[in-house]
Amino acid sequence: MFYGLRTAEPHHDGTPHWNVLLFARAADAVAIAAGFEKYFLLNDSPEEPGARTHRVRRVEIDPAKGDATSYIAKYISKGIDGFGVGIDHEDSERQRDTIETCVRVEAWASIHGIRQFQFFGGPSVTVWRELRRLSRASLGVIEEARQAAEEPSWCAYVNVQVGTQGRSGGRPVRLHKTQSDAVGLYGDPAGARIVGVESDDLVEVTREREWTIRWPGADPSLGFFSSLESCQ
């Protein structure tokens, strides 16, 4: 079992490059490394020039250089605002500051719909966010999780959700969804919609309102107002 965080940044040709921070038992390290090699190297053109050297690299955290947070914070910052990184050494032509080059990274991620960083193997971040929407006290394990999110204490939340080794469907607190007959922009089913959180014996609704978009001029009864008037 393992858990961690994955970040994505673009190569010069626009293909995603991953940096993955993994926490695992030492006894599982060899098997995990073999899995990465199998799927990211051996499955596709392993003899491509430079593939064995550059495509998959395993690096153990060196306390002399910093901890896990130091390692991954750099790659998160490179894709958001560039704060604290300094010169972007991947920018071989001009050596610009990462505060400037990160704008291009954000555009790349937005155009191609790429998640720039994502946790895996631990409790759901979406459940955490829904708990933060729940302003009233609840009961049982949902209340324990809500208090952890309200504090906020991610550590306490992980403990309520039985640690990092469980599977998403087996967590004490899960997302509560409802099926909808609505269709998307291209006529395909919109699918299930998140409306709250649930445990084995309780459902808490966190999204009590349903919002719709009405464009100006489409319905004369709505009238017209400016952003200034709407704030008065």
Image (cartoon, helix red, strand yellow):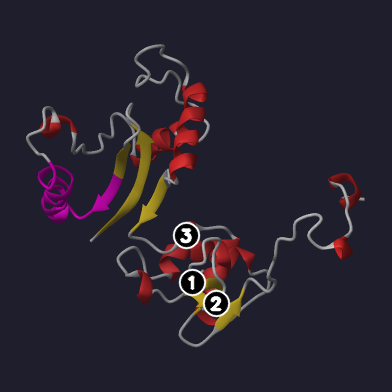
Above or below, comparing residue 58 to residue 119 in the picture:
above
Magenta highlight on residue 10? no
Q: Nearer the viewer, residue 110 or 184?
A: 184
**Amino acid marked by disc 3:** Val
Residue in the image at 10% along x and 45% along y: 42
Other residues around mark 2 within 10 Å, as few (<14) / some (14–19) / many (≥20): few
**Amino acid marked by disc 1:** Gly
**Residue on which disc 2 sits:** 180
Left or right: 202, with 16 as reference point:
right
User: Closer to the N terminus: mark 2 or mark 3?
Assistant: 3
Element type at marker 2? loop
Other residues around mark 3 within 10 Å, as few (<14) / some (14–19) / many (≥20): few
**Does residue 120 appear in the picture of this structure?**
yes
Q: Residue furthest top?
A: 94
Q: Are marks 2 and 3 in contact (CB under 8 Å)?
A: no
Q: Nearer the viewer, residue 127 or 142?
A: 127
**Quadrant location of residue 221?**
bottom right
Chain part drawn in magenta? 21-44
Real-space Cα distance between discs 1 and 2?
6 Å
Left or right: 10, with 149 as reference point:
left
Element type at marker 1? loop
Report the disc number at residue 191: 1
Q: Magenta span: helix, strand or loop, mainly?
A: helix
Magenta highlight on residue 37? yes
**Residue on which disc 3 sits:** 125
Q: Are marks 1 and 2 in contact (CB under 8 Å)?
A: yes
User: Closer to the N terminus: mark 1 or mark 3?
Assistant: 3
